[in-house]
Image (cartoon, rainbow, N blue to C red):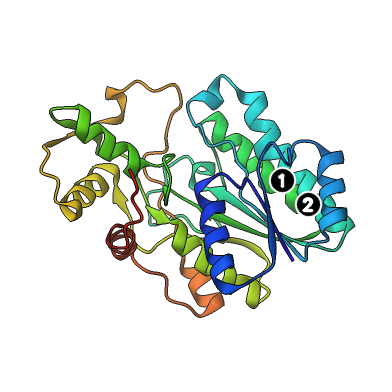
Amino acid sequence: MILITGKNGQLASEFVRTLTEKGKRFVALSHKELDIGNLDSVLKAVKEIKPEIIINCAAYNLVDRAEEEYEIAYKTNAIGPENLAIAAREYASFLIHYSTDYVFDGKKENGLYTEQDKPSPINEYGKTKLEGEKRIMETGGNYLILRVSWVYGRGKQNFIYKLIKWTEKMPFLKIVCDEFSVPTSTKTIVDVTLNAIEKRLTGLFHLVNSGYTSRFEWARLTLKLLGINKFIRPVTSDTFRLPAKRPGFSPMSNEKLKRTLNVEIPSWENALKGFLKEGGLTL
């Protein structure tokens, strides 16, 4: 039995779709059904469901609002994972948790971020996610932490959906050209996670599509693949004066994960093409 938290999010939705197709037994719970920030609720749910595996897709991902709503973000991103880790340890479940490239400051100058690099988040969201990682590790149960970046899938809480909506409203687009990371599809995350479960992988790994790009190039390729002719002006990140700072260069290497699992992980371009071709974008 698998327990999935954060049922209404795009990653959990992809798990629900895939596990249903594979005929796997699972229970998916929304925030209303299970507040992971409440330890008593978590212990009660895990005791009743008796999952062999807990996949935590619940997260507070509103990067700018986290600057103001730090306590809310902390409850979901730090206390929540700890509560799940406590319950997993108590009832002998295996916890899978997702973190982010925003645990890094983006100042690395000699290649992609690896699991050996020391985190140094520059915004409140990144700080809460890093704390969640630490709390899971300190709890001492059986866990797998997977750092992901620029996640997109079916749903509205992602850059691609917003990009298409902007093209409908604006005469031209301004897209940041000085932020670099790895667009990563929920399909890739789900496929690799299920592979990791089969091979009983534990520890901390970076799970992203291969390669990296800027937001500007990501937007340009997306519109090209969709056949949308819209001028995109590259601008620097300070143009928008957002509340939260973003790391300028935070692409992570997936080499350790590929080597350990002996798998190929699609490039971000091919994953994007597959997503759009399969009609993953529902507006």
Q: Is residue 81 above or below residue 55?
A: above
Q: Give neighbour class at mark 2: few <14, some 14-19, many 20+ (Cα, 10 Å).
A: many
Marker disc for residue 81: 1
Element type at mark 1? helix
Marker disc for residue 169: none
Could you say where residue 260 lies in the image, as x and y percent from the top left?
56, 76
Q: Is residue 153 above or below residue 162?
A: below
Could you say where residue 59 lies in the image, as x and y percent from the top left?
60, 41
The reply, left or right, for residue 82 in relation to residue 196 is right
Q: Is residue 168 above or below residue 91?
A: above
Residue at image position (60%, 22%) is: 69
Amino acid type at mark 1: Pro
Q: Give neighbour class at mark 1: few <14, some 14-19, many 20+ (Cα, 10 Å).
A: many
Quadrant position of the C terminus in the picture: top left
Element type at mark 2? helix
The reply, left or right, for residue 214 in relation to residue 127 is left
Could you say where residue 168 lies in the image, as x and y percent from the top left?
21, 33
Amino acid type at mark 2: Ala
Quadrant position of the N terminus in the picture: bottom right
The residue tagged 2 is 85
The reply, left or right, for residue 15 in relation to residue 227 is right
Task: Give the quadrant of residue 27.
Answer: bottom right
Residue at image position (65%, 27%) is: 72
Residue at image position (30%, 30%) is: 237
Q: Can residue 115 be seen at all in this image of the molecule?
A: no
Query: For this rendering, which residue is in front, 145 or 178?
Result: 145
Tell me whether the residue at label 2 lies in contact with that at label 1, contact meaning CB atoms closer than 8 angstroms.
yes
Q: Is residue 240 above or below residue 271?
A: above
Could you say where residue 126 lies in the image, as x and y percent from the top left?
55, 37
